[in-house]
Image (cartoon, rainbow, N blue to C red):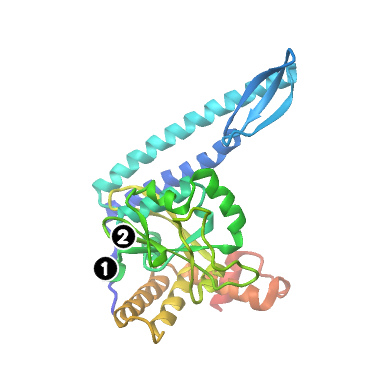
Amino acid sequence: MQFNLENMEIDPDAARQYIDARSAFTEMERTKKNALQVRGGMVWKTVDGKEYLIRTSATGAQKGLGRRTAETEAIYQGFKEKKQTMDERVSSIKTRVAKQERMNRALRVGRMPNIALAILSRLANAGLEPYFRVVGTHALYAYEAAAGVSFSSEITSTRDIDLLWDTRKRVVFSQRLSQDSPSMLAVLQKVDKTFQIIEDQKYTAINKDGFEVDIIRRIATEGDPHPIRLSDALDDFWVVQAKRAGDLANAPEFSEIVVAEGGAMARMTTIHPSTFVSFKRWMSKEPDRDPLKRRRDVLQADAVEWLLHERLPHLLVEERIREMVFHCGWGRLRKRNLKSVKAWAAAVAA
C-alpha cells in the first residue's frame, strides 16, 4: 500500500492545537502527581486530655506525628498551606485542560472513539494505568498523534480495545483495584453501566453499543497462576492467555497523549512501534487467523513501518541503541566512548 504524507498530515491549526493541548495535559499530570504528597489530611486528636497531631490518608489510615508542640504546630500549618496551594494549582490546570478539550472538539483534533478514551481515563483515575498496555489497533492512535498524521479508517476501524494485563504486577494490582472498585468490571461500568462480561468469553466485556474490551495476558510462566480472575467477584474478567503476549509485555513501551472525537484527552501506554510492526507481520502469517484480519494486519504493519521511517526516525535510532546495549553490553559501549544519545545515534547511523 502506498502512503502519501501530504494526504495524511493533519490540518496545521489542528496540529498547533494538539501541541498546546498536550502541553496542558502533561502539566496536569505533573501537578496531580505533586498533589499526592498532600493527599489526605492532618487533624488534632485529644487522648487523655492531650492533643496529638494525626496524619490521615485518603483510604482512612492514620499515623500519629506526636503531641502538640511548637514543632508539630509548624508541621500542621505547613501542611495546610501546601495543601491549599496544590488544590488551587490542580483546580487551575483542570480549568485550562477543559478549555483545551473544547478547542480540540472545535478544531476536530481528536480521532479516537470516545468510549475507548473514557476507558483509558478511568484506568488512570483509578490508579490502574500502570498495570495495562493498549495493544492492537487502538495503538495506532498514539502513533499517529506523535507523528501529526491521520491514518485512514480502513486501518483504524475497530469495535474493541485490547488491554494487556501484566501478571508480574498482579499482587499490587489487586490491592489497588480493591481500593477503587469491587471488580474490574465495576471499573468499566463507571464508564458505561451497560458493560457486561460475555458468558462464553469471560475475557471480554461488551456494552449496549457492541463495543468490546478484551483483557489478555502472557502465557503462564514464572509461577503465574492459571486460570486467573481479576478479582474475587464472581462476575469479573477471567484473563485469557495470548500467544506472544509475553513479547509485548517485555517490549519497550511507547506513551503519548491521545484525543477523542469529542475533544477529551488521556495518556495511552502501548508498545514501541517497531514491536507493533513485527507483531502484526507475525499475526498476518498465522494459519488460523481470519483472512480479512490478516489483510488488515499487513496494512497496519506497512503503515506504522512507513511512519517510523518518514516521521518518527528517532524511534528507530532508540530501538537500535537498545539492541546494541542488549548484544554488546554497557561496558563495550563505554569503550567506544558512546557517552550520549547523540553519540549513540551517530554510531548507529555509521
Looking at the rendered image, the disc whose residue lies closer to the viewer, 1 or 2, is: 2
Residue 208's spot in the image, x, y percent? 27, 55
At 44% from the left edge and 81% from the top edge, which residue is drawn?
282
Residue 247's spot in the image, x, y percent? 54, 73
As drawn, the label of residue 152 is: 1
At 27% from the left edge and 47% from the top edge, which residue is drawn?
105
Residue 128 vertical placement versus 69 (above, below)? below
Please, which residue is most extreme toward the front here? 234
Quarter containing the N terminus = bottom left
Task: Say few, some or many: other residues with alpha carbon within 10 Å of mark 2 (under 14 / 14 to 19 / 20 or more).
Answer: some
Give the distance between the C-alpha atoms of the residues marked 1 and 2, in whole angstroms.
Answer: 20 Å
Quarter containing the C terminus = bottom right
State the residue in front, 135 or 206: 206
State the residue in front, 336 or 173: 173
**Residue type highlighted by circle 2:** Phe
Number of numbered discs present? Answer: 2
Residue 19 visible in the snapshot = no
State the residue in front, 258 or 348: 258
As drawn, the label of residue 34 is: none
Residue 332's spot in the image, x, y percent? 71, 75
Residue 86's spot in the image, x, y percent? 53, 31
Residue 136 vertical placement versus 15 (above, below)? below
Residue 332 visible in the snapshot = yes
Marked residue nearer the N-terminal end (1 or 2): 1
At 47% from the left edge and 49% from the top edge, which residue is drawn?
124
As drawn, the label of residue 211 is: 2
**Residue type highlighted by circle 1:** Ser
* Image quarter of residue 57: top right
Residue 249 vertical placement versus 297 (above, below)? above
State the residue in front, 65 or 150: 65
Q: Is residue 179 left or right of residue 94?
A: right
